[in-house]
Image: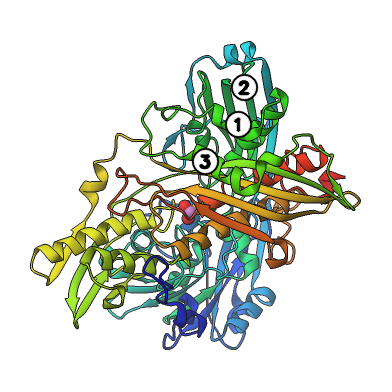
Amino acid sequence: MSTIGGMRRVEGREKVTGRATYAFEYAVEGAAYGHPVQAPIARGRITTIDAEAALAVPGVLAVVSSADPPPLGSVEDPELAVFQSPQVAYHGQVVAVVVAETAEIAREAAETALRIEYQAEPHDVVLRPDHPRLYAPERVNPAFPGRTEKGDVEAGLADAAYTVDQTYTTPALHNNPMEPHAAIAAWEPDGSLTVYDSTQGATAHRDTIAAVLGLRQDQVRVISRHVGGGFGSKGTPRPHVIVAAVAARAAGRPVKVALTRQQMYDMTGYRTPTIQRVRLGADEDGRLTAIDHDAVEQSSTLKEFAEQTTTPTRVMYAAPALRTTHHLVRLDVPTPSWMRAPGECPGMFALESAMDELAEAAGIDPVELRVLNEPAAEPESGRPFSSRNLVACLREGARRFGWDRRDPRPGVRREGRWLVGTGVACSTYPAYRRPSSATAVAEDGGYVVRVAAADIGTGARTVLTQIAAEALNTSPDRVRVEIGDSDLPRASLAGGSMGTASWGTAVVRACEALLKNGGQEGRADTSEEVAAGSAFARHAFGAQFAEVRVDADTGEVRVPRLLGVFAAGRIVNPVLARSQFIGGMTMGLGMALMEESFVDPRFGDFLNHDLAQYHVAACADVQDVEAVWIDEEDPYLNPMGSKGIGEIGIVGTAAAIANAVYHATGRRVRDLPITPARLL
Ligand code: MOS
């Protein structure tokens, strides 16, 4: 039997037997199907839309486009202003939807009978560090200063005994949740709207959808009980949801829209490519004298999304001089968005690669270099850490991995065709928390806890069941947790690795209220508790170790061993936490070796639009991947004592692998992914 700590997913049986209902699968009576039509040019305008032939196809019910713009309310996100203008801002932007009795008819009519003509204009889709329109954004996602500086960076570099000055690049990357984005929109006779959507947060999606459609919040209900992954791409409503709603209004029927995997590449966000310059200086002993980290990245002409790429450098190492900056250029591209650890993930690839280069330059072991530069307080803010066990992670990882037997010389270990090497890099991710609310009631001899949380495959429903049972001092089988519905008490997103901390606080407070008022009903809203904030800098940390083998003839890289050691507060559920960590590390392995979205400068499009050409790590790519953690007591976080774990696993993995590739081959690859072509 499983213990509470290792409790298995409460909806596991439903999922493996196919009874868990995902967004597209709801049996909505009278549903029609919408097929979004996408612009084939990267910039320009629509000159003609002729829907006559499409409407004549048997089974076609409606065509909606900017020829007759559907009325919308207040649209903050220009990506959601669908069919409002004939302007085209990027290749793949949705320009029309065809609604039909079946998905096949809708697609057939869209592709063969709908006539749309365009006036193309020259486009610019290539990110380069010397772009004339480069600018420094004031704020980076979500609201960090774009630029920070303390001390004299140039003096620190000039005084250094050892320096590194290198540029690292990461490509555009696409979120590929197993469940593609889908929505069903159903208007009720009273003018209210029900949306079945695959989202990371029913409350926030409801609020945005209501505003965009000019409805009151209580006129919209978003239902999202099961979600097959998101990685950030389902953190905000994507255009297809609004498309489904306006299509349903036009057709007078509920409408289902399921994006194809190919359509997702243009319509559901992606990780911006980055060009990062890192300059490090260190004294004779290896102590940092200066850190300078700049990131160049892109956004769209529609809106500014500035990834917080260099923010992790603000928390990692002690240095008297520290500067972090961001530069952005707005191109004729889809708007980048969140992808698992936006900021930390690409930023730490650059910083942790540079630290490895510094270790080499200074002749210091890479683990020791990091230990040597451990800060006493958060480097940028000077605030004390609520807890920081990075050194413990490095030491424990080194012990488990057998690091002390490592010969530092690069390119000297060969087993047959394989060059063998090992590498290390650090992980970090902030411990966020947002306001949420919850109710707990005694019902049917047990308890029901309600909170508009989202389980995107993490096991949130299970963890909240545990947390409620603990707070109620009862067993988890007497607790039922309802989530995934905007009619439930409002709650924050499954994003920023803050789900458990945010919802869990509300659940604990609701349960406490129930016990206090005699056991009937407890309600909680954590707005005040969360707004009180903290005097502490709160982050999780980790250390990742990789062993690689590089085929000396073909440049193929294999990763026989990956070990992550994390310090993330109290681990509420070890089984689910391990899955989160190794899932993140596996995605990091894909980032290191395979994942890359290619832009075709001629057409302004991503060339690879599916999993046949955009390679994610599969079972055969992953050999021995293990995650463990340091027990960390931190009273300054939340009632559970937990830090988020959904994203930290992907932070640092790519650097650990790149550093191991250097150790194996003597070749430093600074541009991801590390393909055979880059090693030969
Ligand atoms: Mo995560 S990229 O904050 O959903």
Q: Quadrant of the C terminus?
A: top right
Q: Quadrant of the N terminus?
A: bottom left
Q: Which residue in the structure is indicated by mark 3?
A: 306
Q: CA–CA distance between discs 2 and 1?
A: 9 Å
Label 3 packing within 10 angstroms: few (<14), some (14-19), many (20+): many
* Comes first in the chain, label 2 or label 1: 2
Q: Is residue 259 left or right of residue 559?
A: left
Q: State the residue at coordinates (43%, 80%).
A: 254
- Check whether the beta carbons of the residues at disc 3 and disc 2 lie within 8 A of each other: no
Q: Is residue 219 left or right of residue 522?
A: right
Q: Is residue 528 left or right of residue 459?
A: left
Q: Which residue in the structure is indicated by mark 2?
A: 286
Label 1 packing within 10 angstroms: few (<14), some (14-19), many (20+): some
- Check whether the beta carbons of the residues at disc 2 and disc 1 lie within 8 A of each other: yes
Q: In which quadrant of the rendered view does residue 75 lie?
A: bottom left
Q: Is residue 370 above or below residue 236?
A: above
Disc number lying in front (2 or 1): 1
Marking on residue 368? 1
Q: Amino acid at mark 2?
A: Gly
Q: Secondary structure at mark 2?
A: loop
What x and y, as percent, mark residue 382? 39, 26
* Comes first in the chain, label 3 or label 2: 2
Q: Secondary structure at mark 3?
A: loop
Q: Amino acid at mark 3?
A: Ala
Q: Which colour style is shown?
A: rainbow
Label 2 packing within 10 angstroms: few (<14), some (14-19), many (20+): many
Looking at the image, which is closer to me, 217 or 495? Answer: 495
* Comes first in the chain, label 1 or label 3: 3
Whether residue 130 is visible:
no
